[in-house]
Image: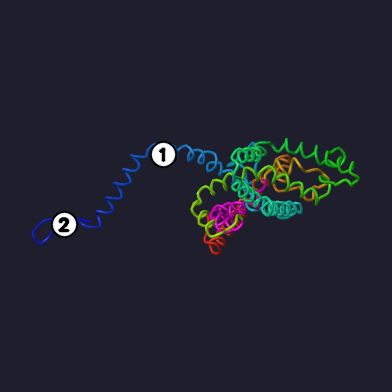
């Protein structure tokens, strides 16, 4: 906006143009001063662009009769026929049920485990014992599920497992950990807790360091014990972290990893062990029905997005905590 002339004949600069010019100047100065940070940010942005966003064009396979020799764009369009075929498959509803069930049990059992471990580790006063415990708890995270599956079979197999050998020697009955559906689910969830609980404590221990120590000192003066301090200070202090991770975990309810159910599964428990990821491998990859595999993947993404948005909305309404 041009400046207005004063009564003395001079020009008065508009007050509206000053803030805009100031903001632009500050923005340029910030970019020039912190260009190293922007350069570092460019690398992950390039990674997500190349490996996450550009491959999204492959989602069109779900709407086509894909032929690998014709390519993605030259394959004929099928519209929603692929999705209709999926929803008419009886096995699809079974694997969807199993996926939601196993993820729900993981959420109920595996999600609180790192919180409890972090609270216990935070109360340990002996530094060398605390560091040693953390190292032991972290190690399972770095073990492949193929190796964990072999360990599970060596320990829990009905005929040759060490645990069942000890139960036989004690005069107790054999427990079918890997052949009975109920026991297999318990084994599946338990092995997941063993592998991931220790690693999950890292985030909560980091959140615990941000709690003001003076709050604990004031609580001690008031005569509060350990449990009272944990309930009134520690848990509220890490509540935002807990809610964010809970929302993210709920957003993954429709998706499940491939290695864990595939390694631990066997034909005797297919009714509970066959999940979406293994189903996609069998139907989509082994049978070369890539349109089916892509359509199921897109379905998972949409359902996961619905879970994520819903859980975030409910969390914001109930606890005033959310991802955004």
Query: For this view, does 166 lie left or right of residue 48?
Result: right
| Closer mark to the observer between disc 2 and disc 1 | 1
Vertical position of residue 218 compared to residue 148: above or below = below
Rendered location of residue 51, percent (x, y):
54, 39
Label ID, residue 37: 1
Answer with the quarter of the image where residue 10 lies. Answer: bottom left
Horizontal side of residue 79 vs 281, given as left or right: left
Residue 231 is inside the magenta segment: yes
Which image quadrant: the N terminus?
bottom left
Q: Judge the density around disc 1: few (<14), some (14-19), many (≥20) Cα neighbours within 10 Å.
A: few
Q: Which residue is mark 2?
A: 12
Is 76 left or right of 286, judged from the image as shown? left
Q: Position of residue 78 (x, y in %)?
A: 64, 49
Task: Pick the residue in front: 82 or 53.
Answer: 53
Asked if residue 133 is positioned above or below residue 311 in the image, the reply reads: above
* Residue found at the far right of this picture: 171
Q: Which residues are magenta?
A: 227-256
* Nearer the observer, 301 or 143: 143
Alpha carbon of mark 2 to alpha carbon of mark 1: how far? 40 Å
Residue 223 located within the stretch drawn in magenta: no
Residue 15 relative to residue 285: left or right: left
Position of residue 206 measured from the top left corner of the image (x, y, whole percent) = 54, 46
Query: Residue 128's quadrant in the figure?
Result: top right
Which residue sits at x=32%, y=43%?
A: 28
Residue lying at the far bottom of the rendered structure: 317
């Amino acid at each position: 906006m041009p400046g207005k002339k004063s009564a003395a004949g001079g020009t008065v600069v508009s007050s509206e143009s000053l803030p805009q010019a100031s903001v632009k100047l500050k923005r340029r100065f910030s970019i020039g001063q912190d260009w190293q940070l922007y350069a570092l940010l460019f690398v992950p942005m390039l990674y997500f662009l190349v490996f996450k966003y550009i491959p999204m064009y492959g989602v069109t396979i779900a709407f086509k009769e894909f032929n690998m020799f014709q390519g993605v764009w030259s394959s004929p369009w099928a519209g929603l026929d692929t999705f209709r075929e999926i929803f008419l498959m009886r096995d699809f509803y079974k694997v969807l049920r199993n996926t939601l069930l196993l993820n729900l049990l993981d959420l109920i059992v595996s999600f609180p485990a790192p919180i409890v471990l972090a609270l216990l580790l935070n109360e340990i006063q002996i530094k060398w014992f605390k560091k040693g415990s953390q190292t032991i708890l972290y190690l399972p995270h770095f073990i492949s599920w193929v190796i964990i599956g072999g360990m599970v079979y060596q320990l829990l197999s009905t005929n040759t497992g060490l645990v069942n050998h000890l139960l036989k020697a004690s005069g107790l009955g054999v427990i079918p950990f890997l052949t009975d559906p109920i026991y297999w689910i318990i084994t599946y969830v338990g092995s997941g807790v063993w592998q991931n609980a220790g690693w999950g404590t890292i985030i909560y221990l980091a959140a615990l360091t941000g709690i003001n120590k003076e709050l604990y000192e004031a609580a001690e003066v008031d005569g509060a014990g350990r449990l009272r301090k944990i309930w009134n200070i520690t848990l509220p202090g890490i509540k935002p972290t807990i809610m964010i991770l809970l929302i993210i975990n709920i957003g993954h309810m429709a998706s499940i990893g491939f290695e864990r159910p595939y390694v631990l599964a066997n034909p005797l428990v297919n009714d509970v062990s066959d999940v979406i990821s293994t189903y996609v491998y069998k139907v989509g990859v082994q049978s070369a029905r890539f349109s089916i595999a892509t359509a199921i993947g897109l379905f998972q993404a949409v359902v996961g997005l619905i879970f994520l948005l819903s859980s975030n909305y409910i969390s914001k309404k109930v606890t005033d905590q959310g991802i955004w």
